[in-house]
Amino acid sequence: MLNDQAATLRALAAHKASHGQRAHHSRVIVIASGKGGVGKTNIAVNLGIAWAERGLKVAILDADMGLANVDIVLGINPRYNLSHVINGERTLMEVMVKGPQELGIIAGGSGIAELADIGQYKLERFIDGLSELDESLDILLIDTGAGISRSVLSFALASDETLVVATPDPTSIADAYGLIKVVALRNPQAQVRVIVNMCESQKNGEEVFYKLDSVARRFLSRELDWAGSIPRDVMVQRAVQEFQPFYIAYPRCKAAVAIGQMADRLLDEGPRTMQHLPSTNAGGISGLFRRVMHLVRH
Ligand SMILES: Nc1ncnc2c1ncn2[C@@H]1O[C@H](COP(=O)(O)OP(=O)(O)OP(=O)(O)O)[C@@H](O)[C@H]1O
Ligand SMILES: [Mg+2]
């Protein structure tokens, strides 16, 4: 029986190879912001859980090199991180821990910084390992640190899809524009979607989006896409204090409802680049990391 199955699998693999079918690639979405503390990590975790709840295989890569973020929001403490993968001590699958709804969490640790200096052998081994992740995930969300540091930018510049988080606070809007500007100039094919977090009303969120969109149209000749708004909600703070994602702890709170709607919208729309623009950024997770490597090394 087992032999039969193995033979069938081999035949299937040979069939795929001979028909030149492309390997499965995950949808990769980078979450970034100009100003810090605007809610990126909370959005990444809760959006990830909402997608996982809808039956998708989702993981978050915590690429913030500052304080670990995702593990704090989830109250978990991953033992290993990307650095162990790069050094060949662990595989990616061993480093990934499971959160609520089977959401995968990969801690970046110092691994992201190390990528800039590793040799060709380690790099190829690392990229090979990423293809396993590509096979097993539907969506990889990459949570970055704030600002336009080299590492944040390299992810935003390498990605097909970036979610830029802003709040109604004027400095946050200005800093979001700064980030959007760099991405628009250096990665013109990328789809940039805006999330307005901590808004007082939906109208307030839309006003912030229109402000950013009109400045981007005028000065960058560039349209932005709207991902949705999330209201300011005390339940978010309460959940953070309890080390729980609000989508799980308070599923009926305003922020959780908004996250659910955003999850559906982003799934319905899909990545635009794959629909009608020639993508320079194909290749899922391994493709993204190749481009990140190129950016951090040059
Ligand atoms: N919708 C919201 N309503 C109320 N408070 C919120 C909301 N979103 C985020 N916050 C508050 O903002 C804090 C910062 O959120 P979070 O850590 O997700 O931001 P971040 O952008 O990831 O920050 P950093 O740039 O430091 O990584 C949270 O601890 C929470 O208290
Ligand atoms: Mg964060």
Image (cartoon, grey):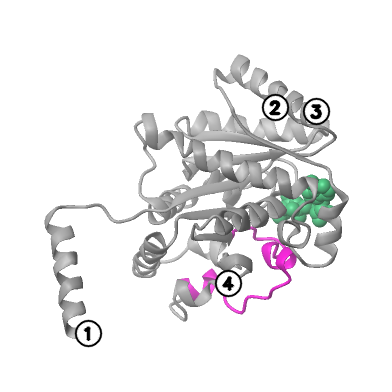
User: How far is the residue under mark 3 from the one under mark 1?
Assistant: 60 Å
Q: Comparing marks 2 and 3, which lies closer to the viewer?
A: 3
Inspect the image, locate mark 4, and give the three-letter code of the amino acid beneath it. Lys
Determine the image quadrant of residue 61: bottom right
Is 293 on the left or on the right of 208, as rendered? left
Q: CA distance from mark 4 to mark 2?
A: 34 Å
Residue 98, label in figure: 4
Please, what secondary structure does the residue beneath circle 4 have? strand
Q: Residue at x 58, y 51 (%)?
A: 151
Residue at mark 2 = 209
Residue under label 1? 2
Q: Is residue 131 left or right of residue 56?
A: left
Q: Are marks 3 and 1 in contact (CB under 8 Å)?
A: no
Q: Which percent across, then down, holds residue 147?
A: 68, 44
Residue sitting nearer the eye, 9 or 146: 9
Q: In 3D space, how far apart are the residues under numbered discs 1 and 2 (Cα atoms)? A: 56 Å
Residue 37 visible in rendering: no
Q: Residue 245: horizontal and vertical position, in percent?
A: 73, 61
> Foreground: 178 or 30?
30
**Quick one: which residue is furthest to the left in this view?**
18
Point out the stretch of residues depicted in magenta.
Answer: 62-86
Can you give x and y, in whole percent of width and height, for residue 30 in the image? 56, 47
